[in-house]
Amino acid sequence: MISNKEKENDKALELDNADFVVTQENYEKFLVALDESPESIPALEKIFSVEKYQRQRFLEGLGEDFKALKKNAQAWQEELEERGSLE
C-alpha cells in the first residue's frame, strides 16, 4: 500500500517495505515501469533503489569536488570570477 508523506515541502510517496522515498514524478515513473515491465514490484523497487544510490554517490562526489576546489585559493578565485562573468 502507498502512504502520503510530506518531505521538505514537497509531497513524496513512500512504498511500504521499501527503503526509499520517491517524489510524485518518480512514483509515476515507477507505475509506468510496473505497467510496461514484466518485473515484479520488489524487483522494480531494487532498480529504483540502485538508481537512488547512484544519484546519491554522484552528488556526494560533487560535494567532495567542491570542497577540494574551495581549498585551492587560486582555483576558487577563478571559479568566482567565472561565475561573475555569467551574471
Image (cartoon, helix red, strand yellow):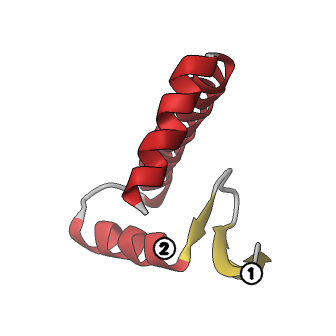
Compared with residue 83, is residue 50 higher up or lower down, i.e. above or below? Answer: above
Quadrant of the frame with the N terminus: bottom right
The picture quadrant where one finds residue 28 is: bottom left
User: What is the x, y in percent for residue 25?
Assistant: 45, 77
Residue under the point 63% across and 19% down:
73
Q: Residues within 10 Å of mark 2 (few under 14, many from 20)?
A: some
Left-right relation of 83 to 36: right
- Where disc 1 sits, the SS reads loop
Amino acid type at mark 1? Asn
The picture quadrant where one finds residue 53 is: top right
Residue under the point 40% across and 52% down:
85
Whether residue 34 is visible here, answered yes or no, is: yes
Residue under the point 57% across and 40% down:
56
Residue under the point 52% across and 22% down:
75
Quadrant of the frame with the C terminus: bottom left
- Where disc 2 sits, the SS reads helix
User: What is the x, y in percent for residue 54?
Assistant: 47, 37
User: What is the x, y in percent for residue 79?
Assistant: 49, 35
Left-right relation of 69 to 87: right
Q: Residues within 10 Å of mark 1 (few under 14, many from 20)?
A: few
Amino acid type at mark 2? Tyr
Instruction: From the image, tell me which residue sits under label 2.
Output: 27
Whether residue 58 is visible here, answered yes or no, is: no
The picture quadrant where one finds residue 35 is: bottom left
Instruction: From the image, tell me which residue sits under label 1.
Output: 9
Could you say which is closer to the camera, residue 36 or residue 8? 8
Compared with residue 22, is residue 39 higher up or lower down, i.e. above or below? Answer: above
Could you say which is closer to the camera, residue 24 or residue 47? 24
